[in-house]
Image (cartoon, helix red, strand yellow):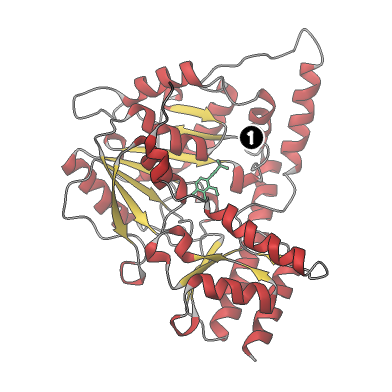
Amino acid sequence: MATINTNYQKLSPRYLFAEIARQVNAYQAAHPDTHLIRLGIGDVTQPLPNAAIQAMHRAVDECACASTFRGYGPEQGYDFLIDAILQHDFQPRGIHLSPSEVFISDGAKSDTGNIGDILSTQNIVGITDPVYPVYADTNIMAGRTLHSIPCHADNAFTGDIPSEHLDIIFLCYPNNPTGAVMTKEKLTLWVNYAIQHKAIILYDAAYEAFIQDDRLPHSIYEIEGARQCAIEFRSFSKTAGFTGIRCGYTIIPHALKSTDGVSLNRLWNRRQCSKFNGASYISQRGAEAIYTPEGQQQVRHTIQHYMRNAHYFHDCLEQLGLTVYGGQNAPYLWVSTPDGEDSWSFFRRLLTDAHVVVTPGEGFGPHGEGYIRITSFGTWEDSLEAMERIKKLYK
Ligand code: PLP
């Protein structure tokens, strides 16, 4: 008789966004003529950069011809994309990595979840609260003990350096859901902690492209010593609209070793060769094209579109007297609920009275209570309309 992984029974029964969708769909079914504006889920809305579209068309055409057809590619990704990543994302910031430290993937969600395959289930894992639910869920699935790192306004949503020992720490900056950023000074404290405790930082930089302030680090490897203690995850999803195309990458430096001296790069390579058959050739050609001059310009244009929404939300909500965080270097705004209202109740009030869908902060962890998350991935017209509706609610 086959038995299940009973850790799955410790998960909360519903995935946050499935629960929101259930409530929103029920409301829409009961009010079919209502136009809901969705500022909840973190999917993008703008089309792919034209440079990526053209490159993917060419890649499809190559596959139409036996002499240029591509089948299975390298599990680690194609050199053309790895070289473009090193040259554009790291070398200009003074970070010199070798191509074998880069692993192309089908996105950061799978890699941040799967990285646990090469780490012991005995490790104690520090998880910021509120948090992108994938880190918590996947570690619960593996049976690891989680240690909460509360993030609140007093620590700028970047957590206090723990006084106890942790083996693994998930950090995500710019942050989903709070929109907070990590300064070099604070990230240095985290790196120093990891070195001192022989811990590993799993650094999710999926929103790095949204950083507007030049003083902020884009990569954890801008911090001295990080190669000995950190893995970094990147994604083309939000940077270049690849949420449906699927492509990202993970950096595992050769210098990163477990406490018993084993190379994590070697283990991850072994894991990928057994469990992953590479991101699609077409996606990788599309991702490569965002590093061309036209691609870079198109990506910047789309990000500015989203950041214009974010800045507009920030101003409008502050004018209404709400306390607003994020939205300056991230596509997310983290907004205090008025008068201590609980986050699901405020979510339902915005849904029913303003027809605007947001995400209740409590869904990201207990320290998310008292906040809602607003995303700036919509159209400009919807963003204007959403703020008009919320303003009316307050009049
Ligand atoms: N990491 C964070 C913090 C995210 O918010 C998301 C998506 O919302 C992901 C990773 C997933 O990225 P990908 O589409 O590359 O799987």
- Look at the numbered disc 1 and give the secondary structure of its residue: helix
Q: Is residue 87 above or below residue 280?
A: below
Structural crowding at the residue carrying mark 1, measured as other residues with C-alpha within 10 Å and reported as few (<14), some (14–19) or many (≥20): many
Question: Which image quadrant: the C terminus?
Answer: bottom right
Residue farthest toward the front in the current orientation of the protein: 1
Residue on which the image places disc 1: 287
Residue drawn at (63%, 29%), measured in percent from left and top? Answer: 284
Is any part of residue 179 visible from this angle?
A: no
Residue 243: x %, y % from top left: 64, 43
Q: Which one is in front, 335 or 316?
A: 335
Q: Is 58 displayed left or right of 144 in the figure?
A: right
Q: Is residue 266 above or below residue 23?
A: above
Residue 285: x %, y % from top left: 67, 28
Residue 282: x %, y % from top left: 70, 27
Q: Which one is in front, 43 or 250?
A: 43
Q: Quadrant of residue 55?
A: top right
Q: Quadrant of residue 389?
A: bottom right
- Give amino acid for label 1: Ala
Is any part of residue 176 visible from this angle?
A: yes
Q: How many tags in the picture?
A: 1
Residue farthest toward the bottom in the current orientation of the protein: 395
